[in-house]
Amino acid sequence: MDATTSGTPTVQYHNLPDQPITAIVAAPVSAFLRQVRHCFGDSTPGEFPLAANPSIVLHATCSFFRQPANFAPEYELSISELAALDMCQRRAIFKPMTDEERQSLKHRCGGSWKLVLRFLLAGEACCRREKSQAIAGPGHSIAVTSSGAVYSFGSNSSGQLGHGNTEEDWRPQQIRSLQGIRIIQAAAGAGRTMLISDAGRVYAFGKDSFGEAEYGVQGTKLVTTPQPVESLKDIFVVQAAIGNFFTAVLSREGRVYTFSWGKDSKLGHKTEPNDVEPQPLLGALENIPVVQIAAGYCYLLCLACQPSGMSVYSVGCGLGGKLGHGSRTDEKYPRLIEQFQLLNLQPMVVAAGAWHAAVVGRDGRVCTWGWGRYGCLGHGNEECESVPKVVEALSDVKAVHVATGDYTTFVVSDDGDVYSFGCGESASLGHNTAGEGQQGNRHANVLSPELVMSLKQVNERVVQISLTNSIYWNAHTFALTESGKLYAFGAGDKGQLGIELANNQTERGNPERVDIDLN
């Protein structure tokens, strides 16, 4: 069949002189010339200079297969570096960066596009960026769909639901004023909510003050609809964490900023309790990129990405040993938790509870430390641990996610199973062996990890757990499945479960589906 009539484009050959087959096959070739023939040189016959420039090879390949290249030719990069750069440019956070910003990030990550790619992928994995998520806040809840829409429900005394009023509502309602803005991250605190858009802008609503506002005292002003945080307008933010007396944000470049901490002795800069100007976190992390932050009661954990591997730094209040340094002293500046090197563990996800903390390693091991009250560390007792300790009861489980609250811990395995341990108050652990409406052992404390059978029965893989991280509110828990279904259990006295309860009910012991499709 003729290639022209079939519609298949012909391959064009140029400058190929007609030669007899014998002339090509029988031409003698010197064995010595075969040995000295190489790919680099000064344009001597027989060289193949394309191999000296991998970017040109890739461009030629892309052109041949009619696929555009996503980068300009760079003569000094290896093929692996070019491939890493190409993959970086496919990440949502990297795309809008200017060339200058990209080069700055490359330098900050260690001078390699492969290290930049590792930094970007690590942040996406531990923070669920660009994916659906649910946040169980103190008395209210936030749900973000994969398309960036935001739903809120529960307590609303400070306008923290963002609906323009202060009316409590158990029904999940979309925040309409955010239409046209895609949200990729959320954080919830006592009477306060923060949302982060895909453009790096931060929107806040609820109480506008810190300090005593944590204890229920109203701030000077209530904001009932999402408002952009002007002091952060020049920082491209990718994550926020709300702790007691302070808030921390993480920039696209891996820099940490905090504001409203209140005391110079608590963190490496001076701020007043109601200071809303972000201050860069000083000390060891000034030149080390951070991929995730987690805030607990007056302390902050930072998951850092270095050429040598992943590490965790902590700063703030050391009560109960929750900073992980083998003591209970406060740390004014971020300090490396050295125990992970001794354990030969590469941290991948970090969680900060009110008084204890947890980490998941690359190999699936789980470490906990801090105040062990009610068994929240999972070591079979209520003792404190001032350095990270592997949870031996989970040695046969490969964990991928961990969540901590007020004396409570949840672990999600790679096959979607969920384990919980710690304080059983408000039935927030999910271990309800009796029927709904009966007490059973739903309020019992659990000293070692136990499989949450009530979530096993949903017959779907769980990908995220979120639970209340506050010592002033009854706790509730969310479980998000792979298909975007959201299940809630625990305290629902403020409507924070997103489920209507009977008149005499204040909690749910078994997971119940919330009427939101997060996918």
Image (tube, rainbow, N blue to C red):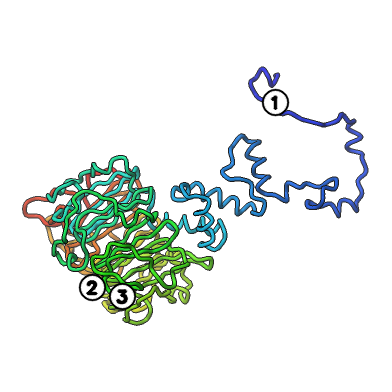
Q: Is residue 142 left or right of residue 252?
A: left
Q: Is residue 147 left or right of residue 173?
A: right
Q: Position of residue 426 (x, y in %)?
A: 17, 62
Comes first in the chain, label 3 or label 1 = 1
Question: Dot 2 corresponds to which residue?
Answer: 374
Q: Residue at x 78, y 46 (%)?
A: 48
Q: Is residue 336 visible?
A: yes
Q: Nearer the viewer, residue 80 or 201?
A: 201
Q: Nearer the viewer, residue 218 or 490?
A: 218
Asked where in the image residue 255 lies, by quadrant, the reply is bottom left
Question: Dot 1 corresponds to which residue?
Answer: 10
Q: Quick one: label 1, few (<14), some, or many (20+) residues within 10 Å?
A: few
Q: Position of residue 403 (x, y in %)?
A: 31, 62
Label 1 is placed on what type of residue? Thr
Label 2 is placed on what type of residue? Tyr
How much space separates mark 3 and mark 1, taking CA atoms? 73 Å
